[in-house]
Amino acid sequence: MLGKLLKHELRATGRIMLPIYGATVILAILANLSIRLLDHEVGNLVRIFAVLIITVFAIAIIAAAIMTLVLMVKRFYSNYLRDEGYLMHTLPVDVHGLVWSKMIVSCIWFAGTFTVIALILALTGLFLTGTSLNEVFTAFPSWKEIIAAMHKEGIGGGDVALFIAEMITGVLLAGLTTCLHFYAAMALGHMFSKDKILLSIVFFVAISIVMNIAVTGYGAARLESFDHPLGSIEELRGLVNFVHGIIAEGLFIEIVRAAVMYAATVIGLKRGLNLA
Amino acid sequence: MAILECKALSKRFGGIQALDNVDLTVEPGRVVGLLGPNGSGKTTMIKLANGLLTPSSGEILVDGKKPGKDTKAIVSYLPDKEYLPEWMTAKQMMDFFEDFYSDFRREKAMEMLARLGVSADMRIKQMSKGTREKVQLILVMSREARLYLLDEPIGGVDPATRDYILETIIRNYNPEAAVIISTHLIADVEQVLDDVIFINNGRVTLQSSVDDIRGEQGRSVDQYFREVFKC
């Protein structure tokens, strides 16, 4: 059933996000041409028009990022906590499927927006500076050179793979916890009969404060019990192991944060659902 | 075995007792009127049967199970809200129902939509309020469910639409299923009911067959309801 939920969620959100991506790409092309145009002798009207297009492009980039976040919140709110909830919560699916389908699709759009914006900005940079992709690749050392240099310092391919895995896990967890923070606040706020939106905001702030206190407290406690102060790390190997340890601990904290907010979301939807 | 059973079922919202120690059973193959004035607890009971609320105490069972994934597969529910996503077309809604409910009969829905003169490509937001309500009903009644829970299906509609809705319910429900129609408009539904449940202030005050009320009381259910719930 999760597959079916994902299919319908992608259909519902794709009709909004894909045109946004399309419009952003078109504006990027127009903005690039406008920037080029400003290098030439043109009339004032054309200059104003070109500046206007560049401004709209800049706004579109920001709007695409904001829209991705707004859509994530709005889909959960309108689909699960408003009248459409009567349809969604009476489907023969469990609450975990409902939450995961929203989280996965939101993360897909987070990744999509990031990719579109990054590609547009990178290509704009290359276009404006007249740099070819070949020049970019030759400007940096090759992977072989990097890996050979790392090997020399005792860092193997396993470390590189682990760093990449840690980075991907971290980015995924960041996406999930961002969604869950909003979902948990809304699900808890809507357990009440009145002032649901106000209470959702209160829960959002409360979750932020509690999580910050918990993470800061944990960090402070760990610093005190540090048995491997930075000053003693002389070898690169030791530093790498130390960084792996720090990242693993950071990921663990993020998983705990996500699990707590996931549980709050599920409890809110399962035990406290109170559709108006 | 009863398709719906409530055992000492209670639901509280803060200081308000919406349902108070309700015991009742509904057998398959019956069309049951859940009758009571506004705010009597009808919608709360239907929401509990759908798993949209959780009981404060007691239990509610659908086909012997607590409301959940399994019971939702056999319950066809019409809420007293417009709950279809406005951006979707009637065809997309049928795709949706077909995907999630194995008992959804697409041909039946297509036939009813055609009879209503609604194009499958029409978006929900392009439809009038009355048409939206009819499309919701068509989707719900195109399922071969074991329990139909219809919350105020004829509330706030004109007499012609009322006839259409009741006819659609009676012509399309699975005869082996139970149909529960919640309403306070007794005169309009009385003709299609087998049994009635009177509910007031969260308590079930009567559960009886329509024939028994007519035989024992010598009057229609509507007349009896007016007397019982006289202000």
Image (tube, coloured by chain):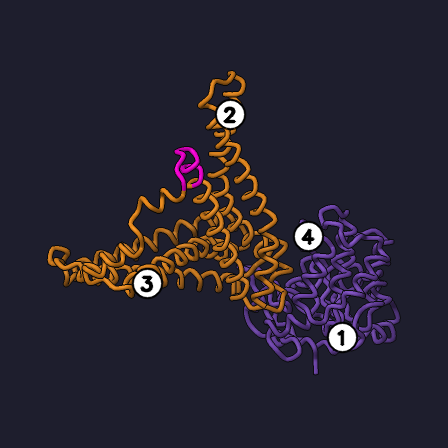
Chain colours: A orange, B purple
Residue B217 drawn at (x, y percent): 85, 72
Do tag 4 and tag 3 residues touch (Cβ < 8 Å)?
no
The verdict on residue A177 being magenta is no
Observer-nearest residue: A258 or A248? A248
Say which chain tag 2 marks.
A
Mark-to-mark CA distance, 2 and 3? 45 Å
Say which chain tag 3 marks.
A
Judge depth for marks 2 and 4 and give the one in front.
2
Residue B197 drawn at (x, y percent): 74, 70
Q: Are marks 1 and 4 on the same chain?
A: yes
Q: Is residue A176 left or right of residue B31?
A: left
Which residue position is annotated with label 4?
Answer: B88
Q: Is residue A174 left or right of residue A146?
A: right
Q: Which circle marks residue A50 in the picture? A: 2
**Earlier sequence position, callout 1 versus callout 4:** 4
Q: How many residues crowd around disc 2 within 10 Å: few (fewer than 14), some, or many (20 or more)?
A: many
Mark-to-mark CA distance, 1 and 4? 29 Å
x 43%, y 57%: residue? A176
Residue type at numbered disc 3: Ala
Residue B5 drawn at (x, y percent): 66, 76
Which residue position is annotated with label 1?
Answer: B177
Say which chain tag 4 marks.
B
